[in-house]
Amino acid sequence: MADQTQTLNVTARTPEGSRSTRRLRRQGKVPGVLYGRGVDPLPFAVDARELRHALHAAGAVLDVTVDGESTPAVLKEAQRHPLRGETTHVDLLRVDLTKPIQAVVAIELTGGDEAPGVKDGGILDQPTREVNVEALPTDIPESIQIDVSALNIGDSVTLALAKVPGGVTVLDEQDAVVASVLAPRLQTEGEEEEGIEQETAVVGEGESDEAGEDAGDE
């Protein structure tokens, strides 16, 4: 549960275009905007390390402090650098701790290594990795767990078997398939021969390349 509020100190900023945001990032800060509850959006800047620490617990309620005033908020959206993975922009949403909110929560599979189907060589497939829930901000769980330890090859589990904490309502269809154990894919004789041919070709190319390099060294 997101029962521990994380403090996040931010500084109000005046948007000045992409050059300004690049300068902020070079200073180790992340630009963001605080929305919600009928208040004008507030652009802000926050220390990247402090933000990373505050968001460590998924679904955490943030005690956002601006100029000495604080307000509870949750992460609405985070943009990340496509290569480095670091956060480049965040949108935060003000919340009323006494009113339910909707959130997307990760689905965590448990017991996968113990499933008979997996032990028999089957492949554990998870087509559904997130679920939409509704709960009070402090009751949003970090994840929803589903036990797959009893699955045989060909078996599947649906969202109906999820361990949902009290006070949390799942908004998605209960019959949505979350995980299945698929039969191992067997290679046909033709595929095996094709693989051997490709392997032989690669070895032949390698030998040819090595011979060329030796000749060049001489």
Image (spheres, rainbow, N blue to C red):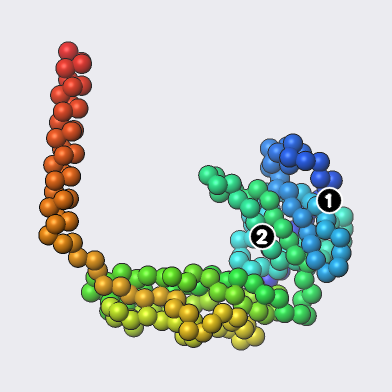
SS assignment at label 1: strand
The circle on residue 74 is: none
Disc number lying in front (1 or 2): 2
Please name the residue shown 60% across and 66% down the image: 58
Between 31 and 62, the one nearer to me in the picture:
31
- Residue designated by label 1: 12
* Displayed quadrant of residue 72: bottom right
The CA distance from mark 1 to mark 2 is: 19 Å
Residue 98 relative to residue 144: left or right: right
Regarding residue 195, the answer to whether it shows in the image is yes
* Quadrant in which the N terminus is drawn: bottom right
- Whole-percent x and y of residue 173? 54, 82
Of all residues shown, which one is farthest toward the top? Answer: 218
Sort mark 1 into few (<14), some (14-19) or many (20+) by Cα contacts within 10 Å: some
Vertical placement of residue 209 versus 89, above or below: above
- The kind of residue tagged 1 is Ala
Please name the residue shown 16% across and 62% down the image: 188
Between 195 and 3, the one nearer to me in the picture:
195
- Whole-percent x and y of residue 86? 59, 48
Sort mark 2 into few (<14), some (14-19) or many (20+) by Cα contacts within 10 Å: few
- Residue designated by label 2: 77
Tag 1–tag 2 contact (CB < 8 Å): no
Please name the residue shown 44% across and 74% down the image: 109
- Whole-percent x and y of residue 203? 15, 38
Residue 99 relative to residue 53: left or right: right
Vertical placement of residue 181 versus 51, above or below: below
Regarding residue 24, the answer to whether it shows in the image is no
- The kind of residue tagged 2 is Glu
